[in-house]
Image (cartoon, rainbow, N blue to C red):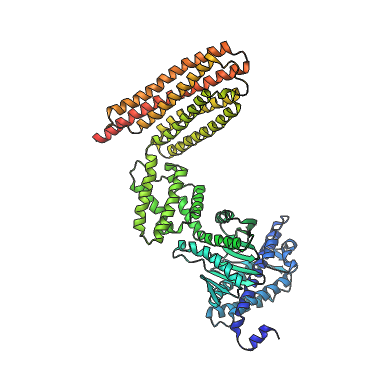
Amino acid sequence: MEKAEVVAALGQQKLLLPAQIKAALAANDRLKFALTALQAAAAHADGGTEAPPDLRRDYAAAHLDAPWLLALPETAWREGGLLHLTDLPRLAERLREDIRLMARPLKDSGDAEHQAQTARVEHWCDWLGGFDAGTLDAPQLAALTGGRRGGEDTFHILVMDLHKSLNRLAAALSDETIDGAHAWQLETDDRLRVAAFMRGLNSTKGLKFDHPGLDTAATRDGSRLLIQNDIGTNDVHVLVIQVEGLAITLIYSDLHELRFNFFRDLLSEIGAQWSGVGAQRSAGLNAGTDYIVGTARFDSADTVALDAALEALGSRIVFLIDWNRARKRLNRLVAKPLSLSVLAEAARRRAGHMGWLLAGAEQVIFDAMEALSPGHFRIGDRLDTVLGSQDAADFLIEALDLSAQAMLAGQTPALIADQIRLLLSRHVARHRDEFALLGEHAAFCHALAEGLRDALAHGHESDLAAARRLAERAKVWERKADHLVMRLREQAAGNPRWLPFLRLIEEADDAADALEEAAFILSLIAEDHHQGWTGELRAAIQRLADRVLEATQDHVKAIAVARMLDEASLAEDQDEFLAACWRVVNAEKACDALTREARRLFARRVTDAAALTLGNDFAAALETSTDALLRTGYAMRDLVFTRVGADGEKRRA
């Protein structure tokens, strides 16, 4: 007599429940695959020549030994409104067998809901018994695979309802709890693995606050430890972990592709290798449209690494809860790609988004924007159009982090709103000074000019390695200067008060471009094109580079003084600003003269055509930079005069 039969004969049916539940959950996997294969068969029959989907990975995950079921899609065809399936009677019998296995643990529970489900099982088994032909009409197919609630019952809905009941029964049945995980029939090593997973889960579990979810169940199935986590109420959103030996396999499905990609990237950062990622479709799931499924694998060198991977995996699951709602709320504040990067960084910081949602989400940000003066935000403004993409992202990440920590500390939403308002004020203050980006840009111009002056002082026109290093550094500086121009363009697009400063930085950027070009030409000169660079000629080029450096220094000083000026500024501050501007004007005139002198000397001293051309180009690039600084200086004077006058009018008003 089988052990199970002995137990049953003794009347101790509850002792059979763990094994029955395990068998029922395995039957659930098989049923879901069968319905997927049936839906794929219908789609393939409708699509004609279109290749059926590859279901081998799902087939393996369901631990099936039924090759005919795997081949079901490619052998199906439609004729006269009927779906022809060669193995339909065989499929119906398999469905009847597995649905009864699913219902078996619920049969004697005494629960009214379970009894109703058992009655539904018998109804559908009788219905399936009528399939002795090999065809399905449209209503029959819908009755099998439909999952939309609110109408008539379907076989698929019954499968989903039974699965939920089994999960609840398993939690109540568990013979032990490991740090919150319901577990049964575990081995000694299994407990260590579950404990590692739960360490990670519990380390971030508080970030879901009072939202339901994250219930964990664990059991052993042959050579595998199975861990399942409840991450949502949608039937498509499933996460199952299998641990076998030193390998972890995670099967994850999600109806939202963006959330799937978010979680995939999050796990890839801790070593997950993904495979089999693709779209699937099942009737009634995700409104009958595609959902995404993939498998992640972690291979560990030893049990220490295995536990570390389980812990890291567990700690990241909480960030899936209400992720899509947070993304939509963030989209009201910034562009869609930016909201994704904010959520990803908030997860990396172990802050998440639930605290922010509970604190008021986008409304608390809008309230903070409205509390600032109208000069900073207008109705309808988005954060990234005013602050720029990077700074808007930085603020939101800090806001999500602040909200999480404050909610964990038990602070009220009103207090959190005040803290976010102060945080926004600090971020806006960084951008309130319109000269800030100009100052950063001017620093790159100065670095370029100083690098050229020093290179000439050390004879780098004949040192190819040194000249090339300078050219590479100059390219980096010039690109960073370009990035500042792009940031100011973003801000000017969202707020007209930035437009005059955009003109300034664009003029100044011509200087940065010219200086980077000079560094590049110097690297060409160092390729043995420096013949004649001796005595008087070299001294003239050095004087030109010195004067360019002085011009950039005065450009930096003029900006530093300008950012402090208003009508109340001291007269000496205003005089200092004007003096710096005029020194730039004088430098430009001096560089014109020095450039002509250098060209004259090149014509006299240099006979090599390449050396002559490159030398003149080098001098011209240096002189061009001061032309751009001159234009910038004139524009800055006009702007400062306008601002000082406007501030005076405000005070008198």
Numbered circles on residues, count: 0
Q: In this view, does 246 lie above or below 172?
A: above
At 50% from the left and 66% from the top, the residue drawn is: 213
Q: Residue furthest left?
A: 652
In the rendered image, residue 357, in percent from the top left (x then y), is placed at: 43, 57
Q: Residue furthest bottom?
A: 10
In the rendered image, residue 94, in percent from the top left (x then y), is placed at: 70, 73
Image quadrant where one finds the C terminus? top left
In the rendered image, residue 176, in percent from the top left (x then y), is placed at: 54, 76
At 38% from the left and 47% from the top, the residue drawn is: 424
Q: Is residue 566 above or below residue 249?
A: above
In the shown orientation, is residue 527 left or right of residue 492? right
In front: 130, or 274? 274
Residue 579, quarter of the rendered image: top left
In the shown orientation, is residue 581 left or right of residue 480? left
Residue 44, quarter of the rendered image: bottom right
Q: Residue furthest top?
A: 604
Q: Can residue 301 be seen here?
A: yes
Q: Can residue 232 be seen here?
A: no
In the shown orientation, is residue 625 left or right of residue 219? left
Image quadrant where one finds the N terminus? bottom right
In front: 258, or 443? 443
In the rendered image, residue 617, in percent from the top left (x then y), is placed at: 56, 20
At 68% from the left and 76% from the top, the residue drawn is: 97
